[in-house]
Image (tube, coloured by chain):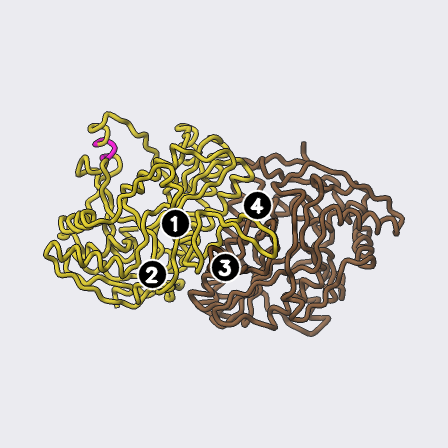
Chain colours: A yellow, B brown
Amino acid sequence: MDAQLGFDTLTPISSIHHRLAVWKSLTGKDIPLFVGDVCDYDFLSAAFTEFRPTAAVHFGEQRSAPYSMMDRAKSVFTQNNNVLGTINVLYAIKEFAPACHLVKLGTMGEYGTPNIDIEEGFITITHNGRTDTLPYPKQGGSFYHLSKIHDSANIQFACRAWGIKCTDLNQGVVYGVATEETAADPALINRLDYDGVFGTALNRFVIQAAVGHPLTVYGKGGQTRGFLDIRDTVRCIQLACDNPAGEGEFRVYNQFTEQFSVNDLARLVTEAGARMGLQVVSKSVPNPRTELEEHYYNAKHSKLEALGLQPHLLGEATMEQLLKTAIQFKGRVDMKQILPAVAWKEAGSSTGKVLNKK
Amino acid sequence: MDAQLGFDTLTPISSIHHRLAVWKSLTGKDIPLFVGDVCDYDFLSAAFTEFRPTAAVHFGEQRSAPYSMMDRAKSVFTQNNNVLGTINVLYAIKEFAPACHLVKLGTMGEYGTPNIDIEEGFITITHNGRTDTLPYPKQGGSFYHLSKIHDSANIQFACRAWGIKCTDLNQGVVYGVATEETAADPALINRLDYDGVFGTALNRFVIQAAVGHPLTVYGKGGQTRGFLDIRDTVRCIQLACDNPAGEGEFRVYNQFTEQFSVNDLARLVTEAGARMGLQVVSKSVPNPRTELEEHYYNAKHSKLEALGLQPHLLGEATMEQLLKTAIQFKGRVDMKQILPAVAWKEAGSSTGKVLNKK
């Protein structure tokens, strides 16, 4: 997709083969590697049969909301890849590793922005004098977010029908690039996407600040979401694996640690920049998405903390570290990639209007 | 699929070309025909461009829950065909007929069997002191039912993001075979499926009664669903088309007229058989599905009646007419097709255990 869109991560990424070799040299540990597509069931069955996993962490999805809204083919690709790929994973577990615990990456975006508190996966509803606990109503804001909603529903059914064990991690927006493990060697560094398709809110803002570009606030900037440090992401996955769901159980965790609005983030980056001698300004750009720009937002996120998550909150030190990383790599920034790239309303059978090429 | 599974409709079906010719000779009316696959966007765009529809009634989906549970490939085929086909329909409307009203066939099975009343598409929830009206929580019982849930969510998003107009018809189980129009000539008769994959509850029971086979009640028979006469199906579609949703509106109707349990239906068929001199018995067979066999069920269905639907309820005359049609065609019954065919728990990468071939 980088090649398709002319994008690149800010950080230089080694091949997966090289990274595993470096990891082996640092730790003595082998990580078996099977490179293939979850949509290719022959590949997936062979990998499950050979590896016999006790836990499968499924991150093999098209991960960008803007990409899913560029044109018809990319909407279809996103739901094909994500939804049908996940059905394959469910069948592979059922057939080849029925005791395997599926840890599935979902997104907080599945919930949308309802005017009531967001619970972790399920809500108890009393209606006309009767009560039931039901899947929390979802309202996806792109074909990507919808693909994750469909996954959750398909997985929940497979748990009920086949006894699959699953933990669905509804993750917020991740910021940061380094974990203790990736910091052990430059070859292990993570991707850091800052473009309008794969980049996410806070990471994009710090890179804009580093290169002296105004922070691009979509619309009014009141859009509020859950966020978490990449170190907490990794810890949450570990906690999920260490505490597997029971047979037939579909468990849902909201995986984020703090809520911020876009305007909150712009302010935090501006203040951190000032402390480091950078003059940061913000500007509102037309919102390319279909979303509320001012809304109620209160999402629960206590279950992972109950399992032992100790959040890295977004304090001054973390914010300055994010800026330092952006400054370190700013020579690699392609200024053309910084603006929003995809307008939700423009998608058609040919690629929609690409906003930054106007 | 008939050829794939060795099934056939009880009623002999003419080619669509012949049926249109007969319709023309009876009424003088031309119905333009475009034969193709909604998953083929070139075909779909050409049809939309040429026909310029003001309403598109989308029935172009894989329609069987058991088929979707036979094996991995058929689960994937079902969601691919239904979900990605519907995304194509949404793009075709957006690009080529933006004022077109989409009338989409959903299913009452999207709701599952919650322990609270089922509303028509949306539910108002008060939670922790705040209130919002949200999509009704869905719980699909097969990859087929899930495909319809995914469609509803995708369509609702397209209405919001692009201003598409849609009416989603959550239809119950249809019984009967003839409408006033199809009764006008033998060549216009509808399909009547009685096998364990494409057949539906009441139609299967009357055919079993006609050939002297015990009525096959799945499990305890307390499973309760909404039902409607095929004449009401057709009328509901007309009412939906005559009262289009507004721009950006996603309207949901529950399209059924009465609730029955499987045991209710067995009793009604037994009583109607007795009036016609048939001795009908029931037997419980192991339930091939994953579903509750005793549960609360109260689903609302007032919106189509408010638009003018006058239901054909399941009285004695209708029940006897169903039995007469079954007796008329009973020489075409293949007894091997009568039993449940697909066990939900047996699906794998090869076709699951086919129950009636044990």
Labels 2 and 3 share a subunit = no
- Which numbered dot is residue A223? 2
* B316 left or right of A76 in image: right
Look at mark 3 in the image and give the residue it sits on.
Answer: B134
Q: Residue furthest left?
A: A277
Picture coordinates of residue B235, whole percent (x, y): 68, 67
SS class of the residue under badge 2? loop
Observer-nearest of A228 and B38: A228
Callout 4 environment at 10 Å: few (<14), some (14 to 19), or many (20+)?
A: many
Q: Which residues are magenta?
A: A18-22
**Discs 1/4, front:** 1
Q: Is residue A259 visible?
A: yes
Callout 3 environment at 10 Å: few (<14), some (14 to 19), or many (20+)?
A: some
**Discs 3/4, front:** 3
Picture coordinates of residue A114, whole percent (x, y): 44, 59
Predominant secondary structure, magenta span: helix
Mark 3 and mark 1 residues within 8 Å of each other at the beta carbon: no
Labels 4 and 2 share a subunit = no
**Discs 3/1, front:** 3
Picture coordinates of residue A6, whole percent (x, y): 25, 55
SS class of the residue under badge 3? strand
Mark 1 and mark 2: span between their CA atoms? Answer: 16 Å
Picture coordinates of residue A50, whole percent (x, y): 40, 28
Observer-nearest of B49 and B218: B218
Callout 1 environment at 10 Å: few (<14), some (14 to 19), or many (20+)?
A: many
Q: Chain of mark 2?
A: A
* A193 left or right of B205 in image: left
Q: Chain of mark 4?
A: B
Residue A167 position by quadrant: top left
Of the residues shown, which amino acid type is indicated by label 2? Answer: Gln
* Quadrant holding the C terminus of chain A: bottom left
